[in-house]
Amino acid sequence: MSVLLTSDAGGVRTLTLNRPHRRNAIDAELWEALREALAAAGGDRSVRALVLTGAGGAFCSGADIPRRVSSAHPLYRMRPLTDVTLLLHELPAPTVAKVTGAAVGAGWNLALGCDLVVATPEARFSQIFARRGLSPDCGGSWLLPRLVGLQQAKRLALLAETIDAEEAKALGLVTWVTAADVVDAFVDDLTARLVAGPPVALAQTKALLNEGTGRTLRDALTNEARAQAVNFAGADVREAYAAFASRREPLFTGDWAVPSRSEDDDT
């Protein structure tokens, strides 16, 4: 079974995250599939709009938590996330996130990385990183302040609250809230309007708006990767993974926990 479904209709390419048994959490295979699909879409002039969505009633529950922490350096592990985020951000065609369920962590930031977000009333959103002993990635540190302002961005990131679709819309994080029974038709109409627009002008407009506020996403992603490297070298990430596996609340200490040589050899 493919972890990423691709379909084309009328100039619209739809990418569907297809790991419903994990609420479409993104593992290494899906990160690579997304990277390849977005790179292909960016080089395909027939793609006039792109829809990103999830199968099985969820959008994306974030990056999949592995059973064991990889011994690879965190900066290497962050590269697929950085590549996917930049490809989505820099895609010439307008992008639409269709969110019909949970959009959490990296999953929410992928939705925010789309140009427009359509959600159903059942959708739920969370910058869950703090609960996992991490800081935002997939462009969250760059996107959130630009969309909601610094204070609300800090609230969402520091408290890792879950908000519903209506609050997300009120904050400017969702463009439209549409009933589940008509969301497909709504997105079809929306993308048809985008496809009908001038592709070069829309691409230029998108780029101007994306880069018009100062610091670039590439700068932010570099800083995110550095911060995440520090996080992964701490004890709190392991504690968060252990707590998640045991279905208990984690106990964060802020301790430093660089793996020893023997631990690396056992991996």
Image (cartoon, rainbow, N blue to C red):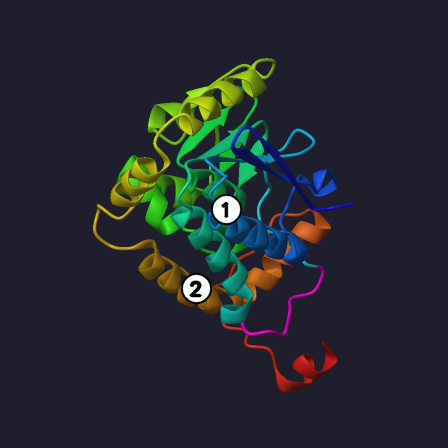
The residue that mark 2 highlights is 225
Magenta span: 67-73
Single out the residue that lies furthest toward the bottom: 261
Closest to the observer, 92 or 61: 92
Q: Point out residue 51 in the picture as x, y percentages from the top left corner.
A: 52, 34
The residue that mark 1 highlights is 44
Q: Point out residue 72 in the picture as x, y percentages from the top left corner.
A: 60, 74
Q: Give, as a three-letter code, the residue at label 1.
A: Asp
* Residue 154 seen in the current view: no
> Is 204 left, or right, of 61 in this rendering?
left
Label 1: which secondary element: loop
Could you tell me how far apart the alpha carbons at marks 2 and 1 are, in whole angstroms?
Answer: 29 Å
Single out the residue that lies furthest toward the front: 46
Q: Point out residue 8 in the picture as x, y percentages from the top left corner.
A: 60, 34
Q: Point out residue 148 in the picture as x, y percentages from the top left corner.
A: 30, 36
Single out the residue that lies furthest toward the right: 1
Q: Give, as a three-letter code, the residue at label 2.
A: Ala
Locate the C terminus and report the quarter of the image it occupies.
bottom right
Label 2: which secondary element: helix
Pointer 2 or 1: first along the chain: 1
Residue plotted at (41% across, 67% down): 226
Residue plotted at (39% across, 49% down): 90
Judge whether 245 appears above or below 96 on screen: below
Residue plotted at (68% across, 85% down): 262
> Is 143 left, or right, of 251 in this rendering?
left
**Disc 2 vs disc 1: which is toward the camera?**
1
